Image: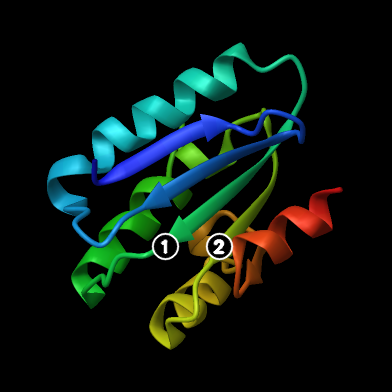
């Protein structure tokens, strides 16, 4: 499977993993729907942890940033998201994550971590 989205069994977190075979143009909508379903069922705000194992083009990054950060109903502005983490060591994705703090993307403050373990440790 090219992506997974699941509530962490112990922590108030949703872990979304985009694997190397993830096809953003074809799968972004289904990924967003899977995450939204988890968030809608949540009884408390959750930390959204995005583990990016995929190599994204600049066009893919711009498409994703617009889809999750801009406009009415933007996925990463869901009321049950208390914080967003991006787990990657890709310099382009790290720069894009910092860019999400701009007005154009709703001033998202995205935390970054090099590993899933580090992201989860900061949630505990």
Q: Pointer 1 and pointer 2: residues touching (CB < 8 Å)?
A: yes
Q: Quadrant of residue 12?
A: top right
Residue furthest to the left in view is 26
* Image x and y of residue 92, in percent: 39, 83
Residue furthest to the right in view is 124
* Image x and y of residue 33, in percent: 36, 26
Secondary element at tag 1: strand
Decide if residue 107 is in sight here. Answer: no
Secondary element at tag 2: strand
Left or right of residue 6: residue 62 = left
Quadrant in the picture for the N terminus:
top left
State whether residue 75 is above or below residue 118: above
Left or right of residue 60: residue 18 = right
* Image x and y of residue 105, in percent: 50, 58
User: Which mark identifies residue 93?
Assistant: none
Which of the two residues, 18 or 112, is positioned nearer the viewer here?
18
Report the residue marked by disc 1.
Answer: 52
Q: CA distance from mark 1 to mark 2?
A: 7 Å
Residue at 80% in and 57% down: 121
Residue at 76% in and 31% down: 10
State whether residue 122 is above or below residue 48: below
Report the residue marked by disc 2.
Answer: 86
Which of the two residues, 117 or 103, is positioned nearer the viewer here?
117
Within-10-Å neighbours for mark 1: few <14, some 14–19, many 20+:
many
Within-10-Å neighbours for mark 2: few <14, some 14–19, many 20+:
many
Decide if residue 81 is in sight here. Answer: yes
């Amino acid at each position: 499977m090219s992506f997974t989205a699941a509530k962490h069994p112990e922590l108030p977190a949703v872990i979304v993993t985009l694997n190397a075979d993830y096809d953003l143009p074809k799968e972004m909508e289904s990924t967003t729907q899977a995450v939204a379903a988890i968030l809608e069922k949540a009884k408390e705000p959750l930390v959204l942890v995005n583990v990016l194992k995929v190599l994204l083009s600049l066009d893919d990054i711009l498409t994703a940033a617009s889809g999750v950060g801009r406009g009415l109903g933007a996925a990463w502005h869901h009321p049950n998201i208390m914080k967003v983490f991006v787990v990657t060591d890709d310099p382009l994705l790290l720069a894009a994550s910092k860019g999400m703090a701009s007005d154009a993307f709703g001033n998202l403050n995205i935390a970054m971590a090099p590993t899933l373990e580090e992201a989860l440790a900061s949630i505990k």
